[in-house]
Image (cartoon, rainbow, N blue to C red):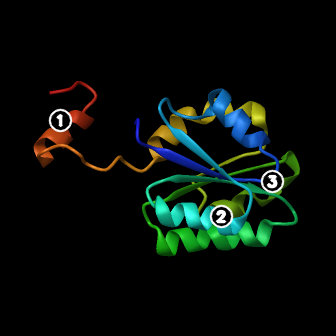
Amino acid sequence: MGNTIAIVWEQTGCWAVALRRGGLPAGCRLIETRSLDACREEVRQTPRAMVVCEATEQNLPRVLRLLVELQATSPETRAMVVGARAMQRHESLLREAGAVHAVFSPRRLSTTNAMLQRNMPAPVCTTDSLEEFAWSRLPWGP
């Protein structure tokens, strides 16, 4: 998973720090953005990324639009939502809009590593043949 990328859209940087401390798969590169436009630009440049967006009461409509937009325009992009505990009441709505996971406490991020690995888009095939690529993805090897 050395070429996977997580794009984080948040205002403070707190969630990015928490993700770096144990919520990301090994070898995953993290890109921080502070605005919706910057997040969209990163997704445009890296459509095979995991987007982690912070939902707040103030930006909830924009987060929901982004989740729906990603499903429609970037089907290889996955999205995870993070937020304060108070935002947990919106979890069903966020998942319905397209979030594959939602976390409402930085302490719970350590449990998301396996989920992120399952939901990260597969790396682009760089081997010579489809057969080599398939063998390289098997847990027991060739």
Q: Which of 129 and 71 lies nearest the eye of the viewer? A: 129
* Residue 70 on image: x %, y %: 54, 68
Question: In the displayed structure, does residue 59 sit left or right of residue 36?
Answer: right
Residue depicted at 47% across the width and 32% down the height: 27
Residue lying at 17% horizontally and 35% vertically, measured from the top left: 135
| Residue mark closest to the camera, 3 vs 1 | 3
Q: CA distance from mark 1 to mark 2?
A: 37 Å
> The C terminus lies in which quarter of the figure?
top left
Q: Is residue 60 left or right of residue 68?
A: right
What type is the residue that disc 3 sits on?
Gln
Q: What's the residue type where badge 1 is placed? A: Trp
Kindly identify which residue carries mark 2: 38
Q: Quadrant of residue 131?
A: top left
Q: Which mark is residue 135?
A: 1
Amino acid type assigned to the residue bearing label 2 in the image: Ala
**Closer to viewer: mark 2 or mark 3:** 2
Q: Earlier in the sequence, mark 1 or mark 2?
A: 2
